Amino acid sequence: MAEIKEERRSEDHRLTIAEKSSADHQQPPTDRRKRVASLDVFRGLTVALMILVDDAGGEWPRIGHAPWNGCNLADFVMPFFLFIVGMAIPLAFKRIERWDKAVRKVILRTLKLLFWGLLLQGGYSHAPDKLSYGVDMKRIRWCGILQRIALAYLIVALVEIFTKDSQAKDPHPPDNLLRMLRLYFWHWLVGASVVVVYFAVVYGTYVPDWKFTVRNTDSADYGKDFTVACGVRGKLNPPCNAVGHVDRIILGISHMYQRPAWRRSKACTPNSPFEGPFRDDAPSWCLAPFEPEGIIRFDHSNRLKHWVAMGVSLLILGLILHFTDAIPLNKQMYTFSYVCVTSGAAALVFSAIYILVDIWGLKYIFLPLQWIGMNAMLVYVMAAAGIFAGFINGWYYEDPRNNLVYWIKKHIFIGVWHSRRVGILLYVIFAEILFWAIVAGAFHRFGLYWKL
């Protein structure tokens, strides 16, 4: 098996594939390969951002998901995850020579991601707020973050596997745009095909009137049936876009996300962008489900030159499309402008981390994020999905609210700062992100990693 090593040169910094020598075979298993530190740091940063926006976004809505059009901090998390997956795939499959072995690995990892996605976001786990488990199969949520990553990973990994031979014929990194287009021709072709299909569906699909039943047991309208009038084509508004229409047909409206971000829009609540009671004249679609991770979504010198140039170009293109009202930024539908802006931002952020960590060697500053990135699945399941907090909440005194998590929030953070917003923010930073960074660091110290 080949080994990923970092070759440092004054004029170029490359990740090269070095064949094992006889001396390499005498090294312990833990030294088999060297990780790309900047990728671990970026992964750790993305997981930390997810915890921050999920657990503090309720008090700080400006960092939570935009209710509909727009792009807040939370709307960068999922594209960053997908960017990381795309960066890691070529590194992983360079070490696997047989295509059938690589395909088996891809299928197995895809199934694992789907399993954990359904378990954590399908409705089975109610952590950390409720001390119960179980889901009605009539209402299980088929799509979620890990399911979306699984789908993107499956497609991109298969493209990488079956085009690797054509890349091997030209092992040198592309030094101009034409060479890069030629070297990754099939990647560009698949990406362009996805864009064409997306535009055809979004702007060409007729969206008829549709009905739904309110399933939220806390709503005064629970059990009532509503009809949403559409009968249009090419609309990008909440009730009548083709993305939701396709999801309702394929997934089924009972299997979609029941609390979409659009409930915080001005059309639905006077408290926007905070959550709150609906307006008396709120349209019926405010109560409807919508799947933000559904079916139709867009999904050193030379290296940095390509990353930064592509990142800036995509960022500018996306902003122009948004501010000229051609195509608005919209995470719920993964509009083309949103994909351009977030992927461009991901390229620029990763380039900055790559310079700081892999070129300048400032790794120790980012150690907490690197530890999280090396055990991202552990931190995601325990912290972002709330499994550990749910376990702690299960041990309470007389009332479920009298638990350790509630006590720490109230007396150590909120009570000291006399502000719920500041207290919650500091709790998330120190008691969740920093705590799990230390735990992940301990796991790394003992060589323990949760891998799929």
Image (cartoon, rainbow, N blue to C red):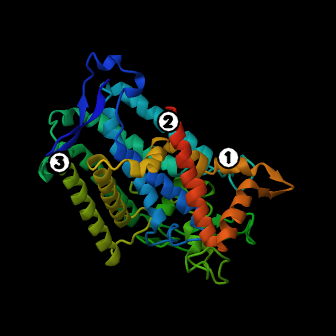
Q: Earlier in the sequence, mark 1 or mark 3?
A: 1
Q: Secondary structure at mark 1?
A: loop
Circle 1 is placed at which residue position? 137
Choose top left, top right, bottom left or bottom right for residue 290: bottom right
The three-letter code of the residue at mark 1 reads Met
Residue 284's tag is none
Q: Secondary structure at mark 3?
A: helix
Circle 3 is placed at which residue position? 180
Give the vertical position of 125 relative to 31 (above or below): below
The three-letter code of the residue at mark 3 reads Met
Q: Label 1 to label 2, Cα distance in Å?
A: 41 Å
Quadrant showing the N terminus: top left
Is residue 79 shown left or right of residue 359? right
Is residue 136 shown left or right of residue 274? right
Give the vertical position of 366 relative to 378 (above or below): below
Q: Label 1 to label 3, Cα distance in Å?
A: 47 Å
Choose top left, top right, bottom left or bottom right for residue 326: bottom left
Can residue 281 be seen in this snapshot?
A: yes
- 1 and 3 marks in contact (CB < 8 Å): no
Q: Label 3 to label 2, Cα distance in Å?
A: 40 Å
Q: Residue at x 27, y 60 (%)?
A: 311
